[in-house]
Image (spheres, grey):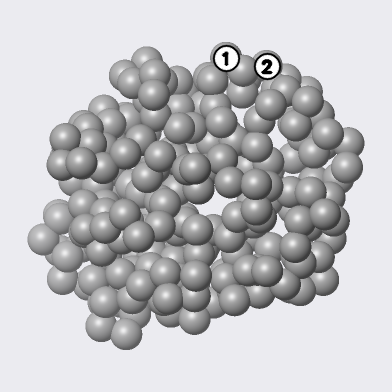
Amino acid sequence: MSWLNSRKLLCIGHRGAMGHEPENTILSINKAISLGVDAVEIDVHRVGNKLIVIHDLNLSRTTNGEGYITDKSFSYLSSLDAGKGEQIPTLEAVFNAVNRQVGINIELKSKYIATLIVDLIHFYLNQGWSYDDFIISSFNHYELQQVRHLDSKINLGLLLYGVPLDYLKIAAKLKVTTIINNYNFIDLDFINDVHQKDFKCWAYTVNSLEDVEMMTKLKIDGIITNYPENIPQKFPMF
């Protein structure tokens, strides 16, 4: 059975295991894998024809660089320290580091990124990877629509912050597998509505044991967390 369809509570490491290591780095991803995650969540921007793994458009919070990534060359971005001597990785480098040990939740942060993402996924599918090694998520529903247009088999996750009136219609139109919302907006009614439409429901970013327990009691399907060690088997599904 695919990890995406598992009946157990899924643990997804947020930007790797950013509670322990610099976010969105290979070091953070390896830490998450060592802590037993089912998948890692990472953020991807397009810079020219390169896909780089970083959350912010501005470099100052997570690197020793300054300015906006879109104004910089790839060689400059590659020269920066993203924490503890780590580079800003490419998406390809992340795929190679994960190497099918766990799933990868790819959050699209840029416009006009869908084609590059799908092309890279197809390259890895041709190397023997599976569609179930990936799920692509985004707040940008247009980019998700473009991914769906390019490949009907790729797993999609609809990212929300709040409860828009038409979110279930959007999810159905995009044929997503999963709806991912901030845990502050998730209650029993929300989960029941999502499950009645046969979508999975994941919560972000859930870090405290108290919030993990609350989400688990609501029968959430997956938790995105900075601290993966707080999730596995502490609160079994009811």
Q: CA distance from mark 1 to mark 2?
A: 6 Å
Expressed as whole percent of the image width and height from the top left, the position of residue 216 reads 78, 57
- Residue closest to the far front: 1
Q: Residues within 10 Å of mark 1 (few under 14, many from 20)?
A: few
Q: Residues within 10 Å of mark 2 (few under 14, many from 20)?
A: few
Which residue matches tag 2?
169
Asked whether the residues under the numbered discs 1 and 2 touch, taking CB atoms below 8 Å apart as contact, a structural biologist would say yes
Expressed as whole percent of the image width and height from the top left, the position of residue 71 reads 24, 51
Q: What residue is rendered at 45% in x and 27% in y?
A: 144
Residue 67 seen by the camera: no
Q: Is residue 66 left or right of residue 80?
A: right
Give the numbered dot on residue 5: none
Q: Nearer the viewer, residue 126 or 162?
A: 126
Q: What residue is rendered at 47% in x and 43% in y?
A: 2
Quadrant (top left, top right, bottom left, bottom right) of the C terminus: bottom right
Expressed as whole percent of the image width and height from the top left, the position of residue 98 reads 31, 60
Which residue matches tag 1?
173
Q: Nearer the viewer, residue 5 or 134?
A: 5
The three-letter code of the residue at mark 2 reads Lys
Q: Quick check: 184 above or below 114?
A: below
Q: What residue is rendered at 82% in x and 71% in y?
A: 210
Residue 10 seen by the camera: yes
Q: Is residue 63 left or right of residue 231?
A: left
Which quarter of the picture shows residue 236? bottom right
The three-letter code of the residue at mark 1 reads Lys
Q: Is residue 206 left or right of residue 43?
A: right
SS at mark 1 in the image: helix
